[in-house]
Amino acid sequence: MGSPLGPLLAIVFLCSIEDNLRHENLLSDMYKRYVGNIFVVMSNIPAAEAFLASIQYGVGQQERDTL
């Protein structure tokens, strides 16, 4: 079972992402969030690619079966 802090951390993390997206003017008109999930409709493919590039967190290279 997950930690009781999980939903709170998800809210803090997503609020941080939303603030950055608003600042960069990448937040879509159709953006909805529920706890740790988001639903976004973008107007075109370049806008969607820019949005996805701006939310890439925790990407790492695998070395010896670990990240």
Image (cartoon, rainbow, N blue to C red):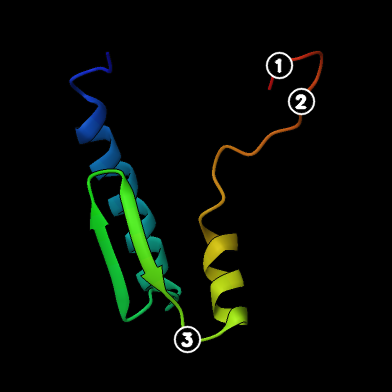
Q: Which residue is mark 2?
A: 62
The quarter of the picture where the N terminus appears is top left
Q: Amino acid at mark 3?
A: Ser
Residue beneath the point at 80% across and 20% down: 63
Q: Which residue is mark 3?
A: 43
Q: Which one is in front, 24 or 7?
A: 7
In three-dimensional space, the C-alpha distance between marks 3 and 2, rounded to whole angstroms, equals: 34 Å
The quarter of the picture where the C terminus appears is top right
Q: Which residue is mark 1?
A: 66
x then y, percent, for residue 20:
40, 62
Picture quadrant of residue 17: bottom left
Q: Which one is in front, 28 or 19?
A: 28
In three-dimensional space, the C-alpha distance between marks 3 and 1, rounded to whole angstroms, equals: 37 Å
Q: Earlier in the sequence, mark 3 or mark 2?
A: 3
Secondary structure of the residue carrying numbered label 3? loop
Residue beneath the point at 55% across and 79% down: 47
Q: Amino acid at mark 2?
A: Gln
Do the CB atoms of the residues marked 2 and 1 lie less than 8 Å apart?
Answer: yes
Q: Earlier in the sequence, mark 3 or mark 1?
A: 3
Q: In the displayed structure, would residue 56 be above or below residue 62? A: below
Q: Image check: 57 left or right of 39?
A: right
Q: Amino acid at mark 1?
A: Thr
Of all residues, the one furthest to the bottom in this rendering is 43
Q: Image check: 26 left or right of 1?
A: right
Picture quadrant of residue 49: bottom right
x then y, percent, for residue 22:
35, 72
